[in-house]
Amino acid sequence: MSTTEKLTAEMERIIRARIEADRLVLPAFPATATRCVAMLKDPNVNTKKVVALLEADPVFAALTLRAASTANFGGQAAGSLDTAVSRLGINALRTMLVQAAARSIFECSDRAINQRMAQVWTHSVGVAVMARDIAALMQATEVETCYMAGLLHDVGKPVVAVMLAEVERSLGKKAQLTVEQWSGVVDACHRPVGVALAEKWNLAPAVVAAIRDCNEYEPGDRKGPANIVRFSNALVKKHGLAAGAYDAEDVSALIMIGRSMLGLEEEVVGRLAAGMKTRLESGLAAA
């Protein structure tokens, strides 16, 4: 058994044991975001109360103003939080809050982990942007859900990365992993952790489904958000935005099956992929 296989087995054992014993340490959803998201679930939400809550948190106030001042809104600065919240609307505001919480998870004090997770975050934003655009093209009703699911489909990776660093330190020189070995272990172990995190954050079932498995389509919900994310994940990898090694044949097969399942023409998919870089830059600026 190789070093990668041994560490993968050990990490899977640790994760399984911690989940079963309810001892898996997961990042908490920020208090302001928690309260805002709870308010936004009410269809008759009082936006004045949401604004007041955001005003009390300088970080989220600044994020809200920035999100409402992007090119999506003509690049015109939002002069107040009232204006910003009105521009964004309930769905986009909720997505922004979750996005801000997720972004903080991908940042780590460990320089090596931080560099690797920066690549994962860029890939995640790429998948989110692609999923949102495909959902809009298909006139799906859950465009924001598709974006959020794409953004969070790899959210377990930074948590596993920190756990893996702990295991590496405990083993000392016995565990000197190459970048490829490290990525292999994280890729193999992150999904149960991501699912646990999404459930702790009380995210939509479609988001949890996208995190649980990005390599198999769900035939019972052919055009649902999880399948859109699976297709988008494969597409951005195919076009140069992978966070690590991948099987090119598997990715090509996922794209072919996904086009058929989602009813997308090859020419349309090609145009989406061709404009991906520009849209990604916009998405990263917003994130």
Image (cartoon, helix red, strand yellow):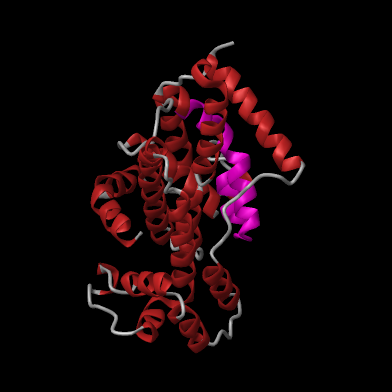
Q: Position of residue 285 (x, y in %)?
A: 28, 59
Q: Is residue 279 visible?
A: yes
Residue at the (49%, 42%) spot, across then down? 158
Q: How many marks?
A: 0
Q: Residue furthest right?
A: 21
Q: Nearer the viewer, residue 66 or 56?
A: 56
Left or right: 44 in relation to 65 = right
Residue 46 sits above or below residue 147 on the image:
below
Q: Position of residue 189 (x, y in %)?
A: 58, 33
Left or right: 258 in relation to 6 = left
Q: Which residues are magenta?
A: 183-211
Residue at the (28%, 48%) spot, across then down? 276
Q: Does the magenta segment cover residue 37?
A: no
Q: Nearer the viewer, residue 31 or 201?
A: 31
Q: Does the magenta segment cover residue 191?
A: yes
Residue 17 sits above or below residue 44 on the image:
above
Q: Position of residue 245 (x, y in %)?
A: 40, 27
Q: Name the quarter where the N terminus is drawn.
A: top right
Residue 82 sits above or below residue 257 on the image:
below
Q: Is residue 264 visible?
A: no
Q: Main secondary structure of the magenta part?
A: helix
Residue at the (33%, 85%) spot, across then down? 80
Q: Nearer the viewer, residue 228 or 45?
A: 45
Q: Name the quarter where the C terminus is drawn.
A: bottom left
Q: Position of residue 47 (x, y in %)?
A: 49, 85
Residue at the (42%, 71%) spot, across then down? 60
Q: Nearer the viewer, residue 141 or 152?
A: 152
Res 79 quadrant in image: bottom left
